[in-house]
Amino acid sequence: MVIKKHKNIALQGKHGRPVITDLFFTEEGGNKPVVIFCHGYKGFKDWGAWNLMAEEFAKKGNMFIKFNFAFNGGTLEQPIDFPDLDAFGENTYTKELDDLEVLLDWLCSPEFPYPEMANTSDITLMGHSRGGGVVVIKAAEDRRIKKLITLAAVSDFGDRFPQGEELRAWEQKGIAYIENTRTKQQMPHLFEFYEDFIKNEERLTISRAAKELQIPVLIIHGTADPTVELKDANQLHNWIRGSEMFLLEGSDHVFESSHPWNQSHLSDAMKKIVEKVAGFVEEN
């Protein structure tokens, strides 16, 4: 089975930076369900085992799409890691929602290069970590989304901002930094990130969006996730009517994957996720 890969397609974003996109699919069968994957905070489309994951979904008969949020710190020339920290600092949740809108509009437009291969009436959103929160909001406001999957998703954006003196110091300086423990980069956040959240807080409240969902939803979480606690998954499950929970006992935030991922196969946890998600997409 030959997997067709069309990588690093530069879609014109709404804020002056491209949404860099990958497609994975086989030419067998045609008119495939579409799965769109959104990476998380300090993430990117080529992180760790995401390419292997994309290949597995393609083998199972899906048009699999993954992309870099336009302000994730990557560039078209170097989509892996964070060569453009200035862009990273300018990111906001509303920009990420706009990036997802750009991708959906392209997928459903005459400009999409493989229209005979993608069933645009069967679109599933899947998001990891922060991207899981983004896809909950997008699925609630865009009827083109027919199914939703969260991987180790956050349940509240507001809770993840600093408070008190730390917040006041951020406002005073206009910028704050967090270290990337893997690359050792000091990654900036402009205070406009927080201001944009406050300005759009109702839209960006994940619980509100979750309660509005009326599509099939699968919530996936590792029980030993040290980054996003299991309570986030439980909250999403409680808010989303009819949602299904799939827990991986003892698994961490990235499901036993890492970057770089030099193995030729997925971790056991990721294999289980691919099987579960593929079945969910096919059955719903």
Image (spheres, rainbow, N blue to C red):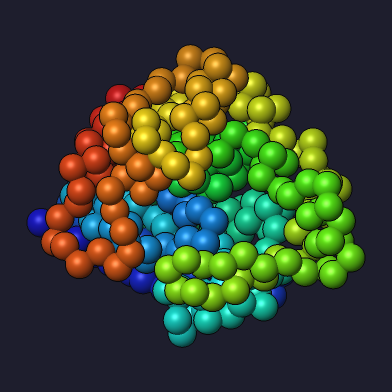
- Say which quadrant the C terminus sits in: top left
Q: Residue furthest bottom?
A: 77
Image quadrant assignment for residue 134: top right
101 left or right, relative to 67 = right
The residue closer to the viewer here, 40 or 178, is 178
- Say which quadrant the N terminus sits in: bottom left
The residue closer to the viewer here, 223 or 233, is 223
At horizontal 58% and vertical 53% (from top left) the residue drawn is: 100
Q: Position of residue 197 (x, y in %)?
A: 78, 49
At horizontal 30% and vertical 68% (from top left) the residue drawn is: 260
Image quadrant assignment for residue 18: bottom right
Q: Position of residue 40 (x, y in %)?
A: 50, 53
Q: Residue furthest right?
A: 172
Q: Position of residue 169 (x, y in %)?
A: 84, 61
Q: Is residue 54 visible?
A: no
273 left or right, relative to 152 = left
At horizontal 78% and vertical 55% (from top left) the residue drawn is: 166
Q: Residue furthest front?
A: 165
Image quadrant assignment for residue 137: top right
At horizontal 48% and vertical 44% (from top left) the residue drawn is: 227
Q: Is residue 6 visible?
A: yes
How many circles with numbers are drawn on the protein?
Answer: 0
Q: Position of residue 81 (x, y in %)?
A: 45, 73
The residue closer to the viewer here, 248 or 39, is 248
